[in-house]
Amino acid sequence: MRISLACALALSPLTVPALALAQTGHAQMDHASHGHAGHDMTGMAQPAPEDDGQSHAGHGSNDATTMPDDHHGHGGRAGHHTMASDTGSDTSAMAMPDSAPVPHAPPPAAAFSGPAHAADQIYSPEAMGEARHMVTHEMGGMRTTFVQLDRLELQPTKGADGLAFEAGIRTGGDIDRIWIKTEGEGEIGSGINEAEVSALWSHAIGAWFDLQGGVRQRLREGPDRTELAVGVQGLAPYMFELDAAAYLSTHGELTAGVSAEVDQRLTQRLILQPRVEVQLSAQDISELEMGSGLTSLEAGLRLRYEFAREFAPYIGVEWQKKFGATARYARAAGEDPDRIVAVLGIRAWF
């Protein structure tokens, strides 16, 4: 090892110049290859050997002005640009129209000359008909049934505890469906005091709202009412669930009701739901203990926990207010027309 290291140190003065010469030669070789291999010289006049020094000196220079005229086709930058344009590699030099119109034309007639269902040419028409029916059914034609118990709640008070419920059944497709709605209230121990049942045909009038029409039957202590119902139901902006309807009774009485609620998801299972409902009447209806104008308002805040998506108990608070002549009817019946009650209930669907 000592001999080898000594020999290497001894030969190093000779090795460095040799490497320098090799580098110089390599540079000259690259320069020569750049001049001849980098261009397609086929068909081009080759310079005579005696002119080689002059030609390569000009070829290696980036200054095209130093290039001889007879090397214009391959020596300088101008020559490079011209050759690239000829071979198509430099698209910037290609002549392109700046504002060429985009051609527009109808599909060719041959595009519509085939059969309506080309797959029938391969598979049996019966099998393809069943497949197309299945796709239509699963992609929008499916009929579903949905049952929801939106509220079943206890309202503890100083006297008899109150009871309230609201539920609905929906069946049909995406466009047309049947709704059965019911809601009511009463007292624990005395049963339901007032309830209503609506049977409605619902038709989608957009992506978010349905137009509904049908009949509503009021059931209460005293005279009942059968009413024609027309309204809308759907999702308003900011995901408010809106349900509004007007009712015309067989006695010519016109009333209306609007309710709105929104789910504020605090966590994946804890939901805060503000809810408001107002009732209106176009006239005083003494048989129903209802005055004209804004008759009642309910504004509540419920917090529910979804043990499962289909089942969620909740607690909350609600302000119940009656106005005008309706409030006077309530006082005459021994009720408080303006009160705040706690609520405790469940919400379920399947």
Image: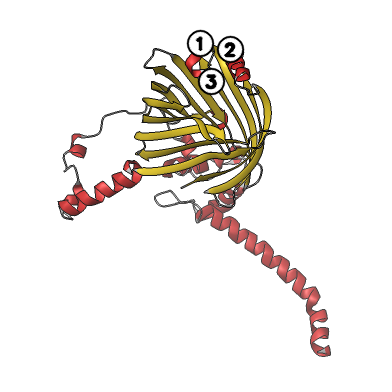
Which is nearer the N-term, disc 2 or disc 1?
Answer: 1
Residue 325, numbered label? 2
Q: Is residue 120 left or right of residue 248?
A: left
User: Quadrant of the rendered structure where residue 339 is?
Assistant: top right
In the rendered image of this protein, does residue 44 appear above or below residue 155? below
Whether residues under marks 2 and 1 lie with C-beta atoms below 8 angstroms apart, the answer is yes
Q: Residue at x 51, y 55 (%)?
A: 36
In the rendered image, which residue does mark 1 sit on? 284
Q: Is residue 5 left or right of residue 344?
A: right
Q: Residues within 10 Å of mark 3 (few under 14, many from 20)?
A: some
Say which of marks 1 and 3 sits in front.
Answer: 1
Say which of marks 3 and 2 sits in front.
Answer: 2
Query: Label 3 to label 2, Cα distance in Å?
Result: 13 Å
| Depth check, front residue: 212 or 343 | 343
Q: Could you tell me the amino acid type at mark 3?
A: Gln
Residue at disc 1, secondary structure: loop
User: Quadrant of the rendered structure where residue 345 is?
Assistant: top right
